[in-house]
Image (tube, rainbow, N blue to C red):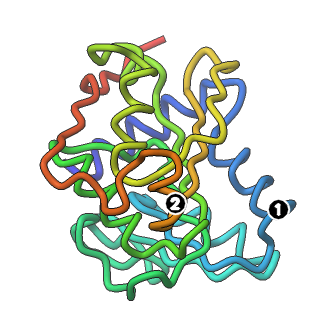
Amino acid sequence: LFDIYHRGFREQVEKWPQNPLDLIISWLALKYPKAVVADFGCGDAQLAEKASRHGATIHSFDLVSVNDRVTACDMSNVPLGDASVDVAVFCLSLMGTNLADYLREARRILKPGAILKVAEVRSRIDGMKGGMGAFVEQVTSLGFKCNLKDKKNQFFLLFEFTKLNGGEAKKTKKLSQPETNMQIAAKPCIYKRR
């Protein structure tokens, strides 16, 4: 099942005029070349292969390890310490039924003020009840501030969030601790033959 999903993913993204992973790699090279990065749902760890050339330290996580760059684990429980990461990335990887658990785990390992970068298939977010606004509201309820909602691409949406620390959360009336009962349910991803 893992191989079938990733084969479909690769075939679909190859047909897009722009791959969101390439945008994230360029962004990291420009803004955070020496960052410690956690790549959630990394697939074959292309982010690690390319971004580490610029000096970044990349921790790649997925359900199955397809090469030695990938640590196989449940993305809601990665083997990194609290507040140990500068950037967490979910590039077309918010799959499963416990998306909020994945994002809570990203928040746990991010340093205060660190960045959460999310690229997701547009139809999955637009198809949610409440669409993009609801998605952003749900992520911010986990203790993040939204910095960027890029909806220029017709195939995917790109988001950037900052992890709030306790003081910032109180000032913005956001939670100082992430919401623990909230769930996020994006529309299932269906690959279309084009």
Q: Quadrant of residue 70?
A: bottom left
Q: Which mark sits nearer the N-terminus, 2 or 1?
A: 1
Query: x, y (%) of residue 156?
Result: 55, 26
Residue at 36% over, 72% down: 108
Q: Which residue is mark 2?
A: 163
The answer to whether 104 appears left or right of 140 in the picture is left
Q: Amino acid at mark 2?
A: Lys
Name the secondary structure under disc 2. strand
Q: Is residue 114 above or below residue 121?
A: below
Q: Amino acid at mark 1?
A: Lys
Query: x, y (%) of residue 155?
Result: 56, 20
Q: Do residues under tags 2 and 1 come within 8 Å of each other at their CB atoms?
A: no
Q: Nearer the viewer, residue 7 or 109?
A: 109
Q: Nearer the viewer, residue 152 or 114?
A: 114
Report the mark closest to the observer, 2 or 1: 2
Q: Which residue is mark 1?
A: 31
Query: x, y (%) of residue 14?
Result: 60, 33
Residue at 18% over, 43% down: 182
Disc 2/disc 1 C-alpha distance (Å): 17 Å
